[in-house]
């Protein structure tokens, strides 16, 4: 049996003078029991029709209806079956209906006797989320009455539904119609019926008022219990997240999400905070649908002087009504900002660990009515802020430990590389020098030409050792900050002339590739340290020539970068917005794209130091990066890969023009 309209809808159409009320389940239970008691204590044999929604609700009342069936033979029970409801062999009629029928959402009890009548016709109106634990908080909307005409209407409609589902009951239903006068509608009432109706209403009014009052108290208690349960669950959820994660971002997001659910409708913000630094854009927010978002906004109530005093004392700031608070009204800009984001009430709680500021938790109540923050609300948010503070310290300690471990691992690698490379780089030239000197000492009659060759070789290897030691000293001074920079306007062309002159003097022309200068004659001067620039140019040019065949080319060019919107700061804190880019490009062996950043690391070697075809310590590019960064520039490499050449770019600030 599946119907579209509810019985309540049909009854109201036939009796438009009736007005619906809202009842808790406990109220309807009490009314139903009172009406059933009329049957149990009376001598009449009335018609009884009860709709129980679900079979499990009928099971709770089955004993009562077995007793009622002993008083009358006209008892009909309707319910959505959940087990063997249709096969019940009790002394009354059971009528199962489709669970999708409108009756599955309705509560009906109709009693029609020879001397009285009563009926309840209700439809479920609201059900709590946790229906299992708050079943008594269910609410129904409908009517209850002792009017015989209304009861007769409802009985006739339900009997029609019963016949549509169980036509074999036609004879039994016809007896009920004839016995209780359901074949026609009559509006005539005797005086005794009217008196009974009035007395019943007065009694029932008192009963309902009492039950409703008790039910509201019970509902309030349920809400208090539910709120405490949600708060405990919130703290447990955040504590669990902290135990299982050392990722601050994950903990922040869980915190704002859970707090937003507990204090909805509201907005919950969590952001890092430092009393000195400028506030950063909001990253963590939970906001109810329909409210403007603050994510990405530069926002911090904590920075406002109205809040700073309390927060500095590690106290929460709770404002019940931002439109009436005298402190906020004294700051029109702050008041306008709060109104813009619909903040009617707010709670601002500091996140601190010992004496250190870590962040801020903000709750914004955006309802129409103001919210008075209770002590339990503030205590809950403060407890969560404490948990978050501990999590931040733990995460910071873990990150510091990871950083320290990485530094220790890097130091260990550096030490190993240092021992291996320095040992190899020192042993080789020392061996050569020793052989040359021993040959000169033991063979005085050696031809002059051989003697000169031996001396040149020894001198070259001693220079190689000197350069190695010089690189170590330079790197140590750079990393220790012991270099005294002398910033002054420097000509790139003049620096290159010095580098090329020294370079060609110490290198065999036959072993060098062709070096091409593509420099404009009007290049601006750069603001840099002259020795530092020469050191960088020398090492980059040496690198390019070392990895390029004599048949190849090395090209040096420069250009002014259009970086008017970019501002760089050198080691002295001086600001520059104009940069000169220098490029040293070669046609040599190239660099794999995956190694373009690694080549600037200490002791980087493309080949193993024992398998290298070209000497070197792997310090040159690391020194270049240190120098360029100290001078306020950047350095990077570009290459298409093996045998496709490479380009080394670096930038330097352009010297300001004289006034």
Image: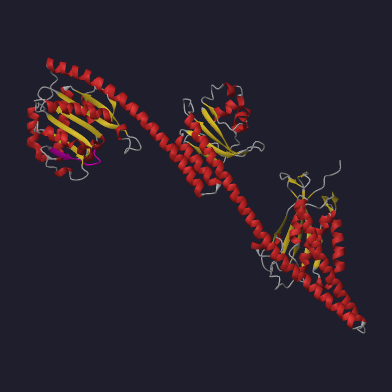
Can you name the residue that lies furthest to the front here?
354
Is 114 left or right of 109, judged from the image as shown? left
- The stretch of residues the image draws in magenta is 93-101
Is 651 left or right of 65, judged from the image as shown? right
Is 160 left or right of 581, judged from the image as shown? left
Q: Is residue 493 above or below residue 117?
A: below
Assess whether residue 59 is covered by the magenta stretch: no
Quadrant of the drawing holding the N terminus: top left
Q: What count of labels does the image hold?
A: 0
Is 629 left or right of 340, judged from the image as shown? right
Q: Position of residue 51 (x, y in %)?
A: 20, 34
Quadrant of the drawing holding the C terminus: top right
Relative depth, front residue between 56 and 334:
56
Assess whether residue 98 is covered by the magenta stretch: yes
Could you tell me if residue 508 is visible in this image?
Answer: no
Q: Position of residue 318 (x, y in %)?
A: 53, 28
Question: Within the image, what quadrant is residue 270 found in?
Answer: top right
Question: Within the image, what quadrant is residue 511 found in?
Answer: bottom right
Can you name the residue that lies furthest to the bottom here?
445
Scheme by which the image is coloured? secondary structure
Residue at 42 percent across and 37 percent down: it is 230
Relative depth, front residue between 374 and 266:
374
Relative depth, front residue between 633 and 463:
463
Q: Position of residue 193 (x, y in %)?
A: 13, 18
Q: Position of residue 349 (x, y in %)?
A: 55, 34
Relative depth, front residue between 407 and 261:
407
Could you tell me if residue 623 is visible in this image?
Answer: yes
């Amino acid at each position: 049996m599946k119907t579209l309209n509810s019985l309540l809808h049909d009854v109201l159409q036939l009796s438009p003078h009736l007005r619906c009320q809202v009842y808790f389940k406990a109220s309807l239970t009490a009314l139903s029991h009172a009406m059933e008691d009329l049957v149990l204590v009376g001598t009449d044999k009335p018609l009884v029709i009860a709709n129980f929604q679900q079979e499990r609700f009928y099971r709770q009342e089955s004993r009562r209806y077995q007793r009622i069936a002993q008083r009358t033979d006209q008892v009909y029970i309707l319910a959505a079956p959940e087990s063997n409801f249709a096969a019940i062999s009790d002394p009354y009629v059971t009528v199962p209906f489709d669970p999708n029928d409108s009756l599955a959402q309705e509560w009906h009890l109709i009693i029609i006797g020879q001397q009285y009548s009563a009926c309840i016709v209700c439809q479920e109106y609201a059900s709590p989320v946790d229906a299992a634990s708050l079943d008594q908080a269910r609410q129904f909307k409908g009517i209850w009455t002792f009017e015989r005409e209304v009861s007769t209407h409802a009985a006739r409609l339900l009997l029609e539904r019963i016949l549509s589902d169980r036509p074999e009951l036609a004879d039994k239903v016809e007896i009920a119609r004839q016995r209780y006068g359901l074949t026609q509608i009559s509006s005539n009432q005797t005086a005794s019926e009217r008196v009974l109706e009035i007395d019943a209403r007065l009694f029932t009014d008192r009963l309902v008022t009492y039950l409703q009052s008790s039910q509201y108290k019970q509902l309030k208690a349920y809400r208090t219990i539910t709120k405490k349960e949600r708060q405990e669950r919130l703290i447990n959820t955040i504590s669990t997240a902290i135990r299982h994660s050392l990722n601050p971002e994950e903990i922040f997001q869980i915190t704002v999400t859970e707090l937003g659910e507990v204090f909805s409708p509201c907005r919950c913000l969590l952001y890092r905070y430092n009393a000195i630094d400028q506030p950063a854009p909001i990253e963590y927010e939970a906001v109810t649908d329909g409210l403007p978002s603050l994510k990405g906004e530069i926002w911090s109530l904590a920075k406002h002087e109205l809040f700073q005093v309390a927060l500095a004392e590690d106290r929460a700031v709770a404002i019940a009504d931002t439109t009436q608070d005298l402190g906020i009204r004294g700051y029109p800009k702050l008041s306008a900002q709060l109104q813009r984001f619909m903040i009617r009430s707010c709670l601002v709680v500091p996140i601190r660990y010992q004496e250190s500021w870590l962040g801020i938790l903000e709750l914004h109540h955006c309802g129409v009515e103001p919210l008075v923050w209770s002590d339990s609300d503030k205590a809950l948010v403060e407890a969560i802020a404490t948990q978050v503070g501990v999590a931040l310290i733990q995460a910071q300690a873990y990150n510091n430990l990871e950083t320290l471990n990485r530094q220790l691992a890097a130091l260990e690698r550096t030490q190993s590389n240092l021992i291996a490379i320095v040992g190899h780089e020192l042993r080789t030239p020392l061996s050569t020098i020793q052989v040359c000197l021993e040959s000169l000492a033991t063979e005085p009659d050696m031809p002059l030409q051989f003697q000169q060759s031996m001396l040149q070789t020894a001198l070259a290897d001693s220079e190689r050792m000197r350069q190695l030691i010089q690189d170590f000293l330079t790197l140590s001074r750079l990393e220790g900050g012991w270099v005294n920079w002398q910033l002054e306007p420097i000509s790139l062309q003049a620096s290159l002339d010095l580098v090329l002159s020294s370079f060609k003097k110490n290198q065999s022309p036959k072993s060098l590739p062709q070096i091409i200068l593509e420099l404009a004659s009007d290049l601006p001067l750069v603001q840099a340290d002259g020795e530092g620039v020469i050191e960088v140019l020398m090492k980059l040019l040496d690198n390019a020539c070392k990895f390029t065949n004599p048949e190849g080319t090395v090209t040096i060019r420069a250009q002014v970068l259009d970086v008017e919107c970019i501002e760089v700061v050198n080691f002295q804190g001086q600001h520059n917005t104009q940069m000169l880019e220098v490029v040293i490009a070669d046609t040599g062996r190239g660099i794999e794209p995956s190694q373009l950043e690694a080549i600037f690391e200490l002791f980087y070697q493309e080949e193993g130091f024992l398998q290298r075809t070209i000497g070197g310590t792997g310090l040159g590019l690391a020194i270049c990066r240190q120098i360029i960064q100290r001078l306020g520039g950047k350095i990077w490499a570009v290459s298409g890969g093996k045998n496709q050449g490479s380009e080394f770019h670096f930038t330097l600030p352009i010297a300001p023009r004289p006034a």
